Image: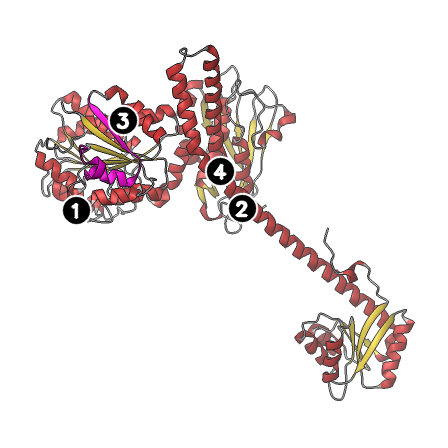
Amino acid sequence: MKQVLIILLVDDNPADVDLARVALQKNLNRIRVESVGDGEAALAFLNHSGIHAEKPRPDLVILDLNLPKKDGRAVLAEVKTDTDLRTIPIVVFSTSRSMSDIGRSYELGANCYVSKPGNLNDYLSTVQSIERFWLGSASLPRKET
Amino acid sequence: MTDIKDASLLTPEPNKIRVLHVEDNEMDAELVAQALRKGGFSFSVAVVQTEAEFEQQLRLQSPDVVIADYNLPQWKGMEALDVLRRAGLDVPLILVSGALGDITAVECIKRGATDYVLKDGLARLPESIRRALDERRQLRLRRLAEEDLARKNEELARSNADLEQFAYVASHDLQEPLRMVAAYTQLLAERYQGRLDADADKFIGYAREGALRMQALVLDLLAFSRVGRCGATCGRVDCNAAVEEVLLSLGPAMQASGAVVTHAALPVVWADRSQMTQVFQNLIGNAIKFHGKEPPAISVQAEKAGEQWMFSVSDNGIGIAPEYAENIFVVFQRLHTRTEYPGNGIGLAVCKKIIEHCGGKIWVDAQAGHGSIFKFTLPAAAPIQEGCARS
Amino acid sequence: MSSEELDILLVEDSPEDVDLALHTLEREKLANHIFVVRDGAEALDFIFCHGAFTHRSFEHPPKLVLLDLKLPKVDGMEVLKRIKSDPRTKTIPVVIMTSSKEERDLVASYNLGANSYIQKPVDFDQFRETVKTVGLYWLVINQPPVMEDQQHLAGLAHDRH
């Protein structure tokens, strides 16, 4: 895969966004990390609207659940019912370990659910595992342009 | 002791009493009054003949005692009891009668009369009244004490619930900012080690250790606060399976220390599955952690003792000095510094809370330097009452 | 097979691929309980608790379904469609593992709700690596939707520092 793959991080905690960037920094030759801080911005990004008009379509979305404006569940619901957007894999990445959050996310069409570890090394390696699986082993729908 | 707000109970004056006398015969009424005077009472008396008069007197003033002639032409003395009951008054009623067969007497007392006295045995009347008043006083005192106790229990239960909820919310909400501090102090340490001055390295190190310890503490507090009443989730727990599960999760620690854990055939008990697993995890984990020079050799046994099972977890570790045998079950109580052995000192407190909630006891046979045997009791498989037995 | 916790339902008709996958998963200690079915009809019976699998229950789904597309009797795409359109089964993670390189199979799968899509490497070693990565990601890192009565086990795992 010669093209650069794009990960959209949706998380309202800039500290967690930075941690994810740290985790992925070794791979910046083949991936690019974009981030937004709330659910509305996430949808605008995916729909190329407003200030995100020029933004590329992500190959993978890593989505936190508790977001301001629209929360992660609403984003999931909207994206996974959109005929154009629903083939984009969405990894829910959240500190919540509650069974109802996990179950609900799958109901709404999340591709998978990963708990944010409390320990730094585990956090970094988990983000790397997410990247390695989705952008390394899995096959993703090809994008135009 | 009881808060006594009723002044009459504090300084009883059995001599000054209010008597309500149901009697239609002036002579008989006077005889009763004489008997009371002879008995040393100072009293006020109202004499009534009909139900209407009786009710009227009750409305004016609540008597301390009712004396009633059993056989009145218009109205039976016993019916005064019904009036009293209807009015919700708990006043002793003493029947006075010419002749009363034993059966009738017992009937009257069964129906609620306090006592009966024969008309030619009025000398007994004062004593009968004294006894009745005394009984009533005792009853009232006891009832006040019970109400007080119930109220205090309710307050205690509510305060406990508040505390548990507080511990849960605090530790749950603390985890997020703690995660930030722990992660970024570690990143700082990794990225800037040796690049700032020596003090910076040391300061970052302290901050990092503090954060990691806080994280562990919060997780422990969370676990501790979750040990509530087990009622709903109690069931049959196969202790063999629980121990096997624990050994699986302690795998790395066992390998690192060369620990060998054996267990005899363990019974099925009535408890909460995840809490039992926690107990074994803490006890076996401790046994592995606090080892001496030799690799830990740990054994888990159980023997039946009446309606309970007594479990023991013995090890060959550093042991515990007998004077600390009770102390170690206190929350956050530690016997060693953190550099000697890691941990927050909550594991045994959690075990104690769990075991005691199930109606059991936990203790240690302690000997410094010779290993320890931790013992605990649990009810056997069939519950004595619903949920776990209350102590 | 009792209706206890099942890690993987492997739907694969090629015996060599089955052997290799099982061997890899067991050696890497990624999965304890794996059930293999060899065609789409059996897969549907298993998931929907029919036929030979009436003892199974919807309360104990597999944590992961590895689904090949080219299957006898009922093809993989149809199996995927049925699983993902039934509310009782749609939250089961289904990962397509196929030798197909057709873009339209890929798009169709994601459209139907496949959780992921893996193209089976032709190379022996790469195949094993892929199985290992898939097992690791979906059984260790991923949190599958869990039924009520298994919650105490999850709680235990999370409380350890």
For marks 4 and 3, give the one nearer the viewer. 4
Q: What is the span of residues highlighted in magenta in the rendered image?
A: A30-57
Give the SS element for disc 4: helix
| Proximity of marks 4 and 3: CB atoms separated by less than 8 Å | no
Question: Nearer the N terminus, badge 4 or badge 2?
Answer: 2
10 Å crowding of disc 4: few (<14), some (14-19), many (20+): some
- Towards the viewer: B217 or B231: B217
Does residue C88 appear to the left or right of B68 in the view shown? left
Q: Which mark is residue A129?
A: 3
| Label 1 element class | helix
Image-based side of C124 in relation to B342, left or right: left
Asked if marks 2 and 1 fall on the same chain, the answer is: no
- Name the residue type under label 1: Arg
Residue type, mark 3 in image: Ser
Q: Are marks 4 and 1 on the same chain?
A: no
**In the rendered view, would you say B200 is above or below B383?**
above
Q: Chain of mark 4?
A: B
Determine which residue is flagged by label 4.
B170
Name the amino acid, label 2.
Ala
> In this figure, which residue is indicated by the disc labeled 1?
C82
Which residue is at 75% across, 71% downward? B92
Q: How is the image coloured?
A: secondary structure
Which residue appears farthest toward the bottom when viewing the image?
Answer: B73
Residues at discs 3 and 2 in contact (Cβ within 8 Å): no
> On screen, B280 above or below C41?
above
Q: Position of residue A51 (x, y in %)?
A: 22, 36
Q: Are marks 4 and 2 on the same chain?
A: yes
Q: Quadrant of residue C120?
A: top left
Q: Mark 2: which secondary structure?
A: helix
